[in-house]
Image (cartoon, rainbow, N blue to C red):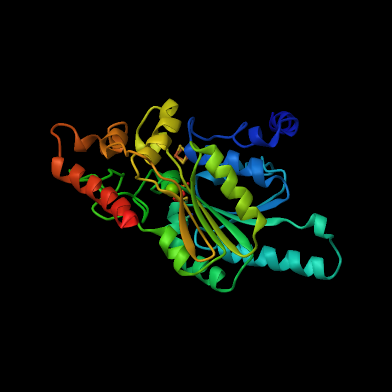
Amino acid sequence: MKEITLKRMKDLPSAHLLGSGTPMCAGCGGLGALQEIYDVLGEKTVFINAAGCMTLLANYPFTPFRGSWLYTAMASAPAGAQGVRDALDILLEQNRISNDEDLETIVLTGDGAAYGMGLSATSGAIERGLDFIYLCYDNEGYGNTGQQFSAATPHGARTSTSTGPAGYSGYKKDLFAIWSAHQPTYVATVIAAEPVDLTRKIQKARSLKGPRLILALAPCPTGWGYDPKLSIDIGKLAVQTGIWPLKEFVDGQVQHTKIPKSRRPVEDYLRLQGRFAHLFEPQRQGKLIDEIQGRVDAYWQNLAD
Ligand SMILES: Cc1ncc(C[n+]2csc(CCOP(=O)(O)OP(=O)(O)O)c2C)c(N)n1
Ligand code: SF4
Ligand SMILES: [Mg+2]
């Protein structure tokens, strides 16, 4: 049965490869982003994947990636990438592979690894100037193990480990700023719901060398509590409300690539998701909603000043 699936997958264009015959949730925003990104990067890639939902894409001995795939512990993907990059460089230097056989080294992790467990290994890799792309699909929690909160969980969201009336009491870490502070080659935020912006950024990242982060907000029907058919709508709302700014850091400067002309209220985004239902029922938590709105307003106001 598995062999038949693999043969069929071989006949598909790369954009449709990921997710075919895999046990991923319908409407997975992380998978959507990965499909679009893989379509640009292509098969000359080696993915170093830390434990998380995307690990389910590979069912040993099969993988939907046409290139190579390596599994690592949650904190270790950048260290794994260093080993892979070094091995490729040695093979190139010894003329054992041609430049044409070189592979783009890509770390693929969720937010639990990118914002938390793997951050120290990432910081070291950026500091060493490792030539790699770090692709983080950010579903704002430990999705694979039941959506416990992570350092990427937004303030007020309910998770399986933040079940109180006010949800998660912490605040989402600013990974874009943390990476930018290291002065890497490139940092960009993307979302599958904005494919033109995403494609341009992946093309740009691919044209550069050195440490590069692609940070994709990944609407997650299972962990966020909404109908899978709403994934694209929720992604668009994340941008239209200003909650997920689309931007890039290049040559030491931050540029916003899509500035919402008139921002929609954050409530439009929050209301669609079960993880924020306690903000509206049994009674409206106006203070908390205003705080969330106020933080978004302050971000865009600072930009205008
Ligand atoms: C050191 C360590 N702790 C815990 C786990 C169990 N574990 C596997 S996947 C996962 C969740 C990872 O969260 P994230 O990186 O956000 O990826 P997602 O599951 O959301 O795709 C956890 C906690 C692990 N593999 N390694
Ligand atoms: S839990 Fe969320 S991120 Fe994980 S596969 Fe399901 S939809 Fe995707
Ligand atoms: Mg996650």
Q: Nearer the viewer, residue 172 or 240?
A: 240
In the image, residue 284 above or below residue 110? above
Residue at screen point 84% across, 70% down:
94
In the image, residue 207 above or below residue 179? above
Residue at screen point 34% across, 45% down:
243
In the image, residue 275 above or below residue 128? above
Q: Nearer the viewer, residue 131 or 189?
A: 189
Query: In x, y percent, where is residue 15?
Result: 65, 35
Answer with left or right where residue 261 lies relative to residue 18: left
Q: Quadrant of the C terminus?
A: bottom left
Q: Is residue 50 visible?
A: no
Q: Residue furthest bottom?
A: 128
Residue at screen point 42% across, 59% down:
175
Query: In x, y percent, where is residue 142?
Result: 41, 49
Residue at screen point 60% across, 71% down:
129
Q: Is residue 182 visible?
A: yes
Query: In x, y percent, where is residue 130?
Result: 61, 68
Count of labels shown? Answer: 0
Q: Quadrant of the N terminus?
A: top right
Q: Nearer the viewer, residue 135 or 259?
A: 259
Answer with left or right where residue 136 lies relative to residue 280: right
Q: Residue furthest right?
A: 95
* Location of residue 14 by image quarter: top right
Query: In x, y percent, where is residue 135?
Result: 55, 52
